[in-house]
Image (spheres, rainbow, N blue to C red):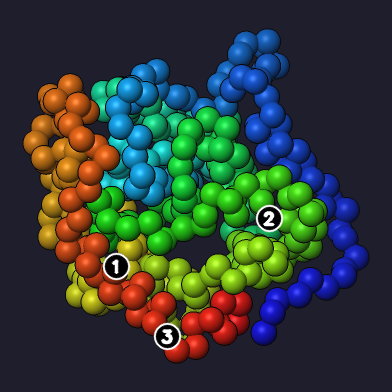
Amino acid sequence: MELTIKKTKWMFPLAFAVLVSFFLIIFTLSTKTPFQKSSNKAKVPIFVESRLHISPTRPISTIPRLAYLISGSSGDGESIKRTLKALYHPLNQYVVHLDLEAPADERLELVKFVKREPLFVEVGNVRVVVRSNLVTYRGPTMVSNTLHAAAILLKEGGEWDWFINLSASDYPLVTQDGSAWTMLSRPFIEYLLWGWDNLPRIVLMYYANFLSTPEGYFHTVICNAEEFQDTTVNHDLHFISWDNPPKQHPHVLTLSDYQNMVDSNASFARKFRRNEPVLDKIDSELLGRKADGFVPGSWFDGGDANATISQYILRNITSLRPGAGAQRLKSLISGLLSDKDFDSKHCL
């Protein structure tokens, strides 16, 4: 069953808010510098970018590169830091964001964390949205925030192939030396932002009237865009534990859910409480990550990251060292693609 768009009478305030968000996105893409004037005439960066980048003389990678948005609210600063380190790879791009519910000192601490981390400074692939957006779980604000981050990544993030949006309560179950079948493609993100046939803007205005815009916006656009509607796979690649029938929010995952997470072959799981003990088990048994460290891979052997930057950055970061998680993910994707009715289920 193909999703269709129905005509409706727009609620002016919501439609106006969506249009403002859209023009903010276009402004982000079109401006020549990442600075805007504040009320006190000081220039404040929209995001903080590290100064140094991987040398262009190194081999150009042919492997997929990922672009992440990791977002959170008040009290999520430490969780964002942990998730960022668990997801980090020098070839990827990252935007982190704490919304307006987070106090100013917590947002400032996240900025300082990125500016103090030697690896982020050396590689230059982590950005913090400083001028935080209002994000609620109702209405279009979450979608607008996601599109804003995607616009920043298109403008400033260099070459990447796939985009994925995570919250502070998500956590990876596989290392970044794995696969890239877990996100929206760059061509689809470009279509959402540029909207050359106007469909993405029309759908965004339509969904401004919905309580749960993120649960339908991207799906409706992709299933009504002829060039993308046959490119979908009906799986979100997350392990989530729901009641039956589902309630508004899923279960909080604990140690008792660990084996089910592994057996699901999913790339990510949610949702977790801050510093939940099962996160330590995921770090040690699935990711091989030491406390407050990065996940080992071909670019990093798991030692003291801060003491060995000059060594591991010079290694061949374009080669991968897939772990057991890559095999689990391969199993999941192979199963989805081999379904006899796969071609008829793209937009069901």
Q: CA distance from mark 2 to mark 3?
A: 34 Å
Amino acid on which disc 2 is placed:
Pro
Taking the image as shown, residue 106 lies to the left or right of residue 119, namely right
* Viewport quadrant of the N terminus: bottom right
Label of residue 140 in the image = 2
User: Callout 1 environment at 10 Å: few (<14), some (14 to 19), or many (20+)?
Assistant: many
Residue 316 visible in rendering: yes
Which comes before the other along the chain, label 3 or label 1? 1
Depicted 129 relative to depicted 194: above or below: above
Residue pictured at 68% horizontal, 10% vertical: 41
Q: Residue furthest right?
A: 9
Give yes or no for contact between labels 2 and 1 (Cβ–Cβ under 8 Å). no
For the residue pair 161 and 93, the one nearer the viewer reads as 161
Residue under label 3, please give it.
339
- The quadrant holding residue 99 is top right
Taking the image as shown, residue 290 lies to the left or right of residue 171, namely left
Taking the image as shown, residue 78 lies to the left or right of residue 4, namely left
Residue pictured at 17% horizontal, 58% vertical: 323
Look at the numbered disc 3 and give the secondary structure of its residue: loop
Residue under label 1, please give it.
329
Residue 216 visible in rendering: no
Circle nearer the viewer, 2 or 1: 1
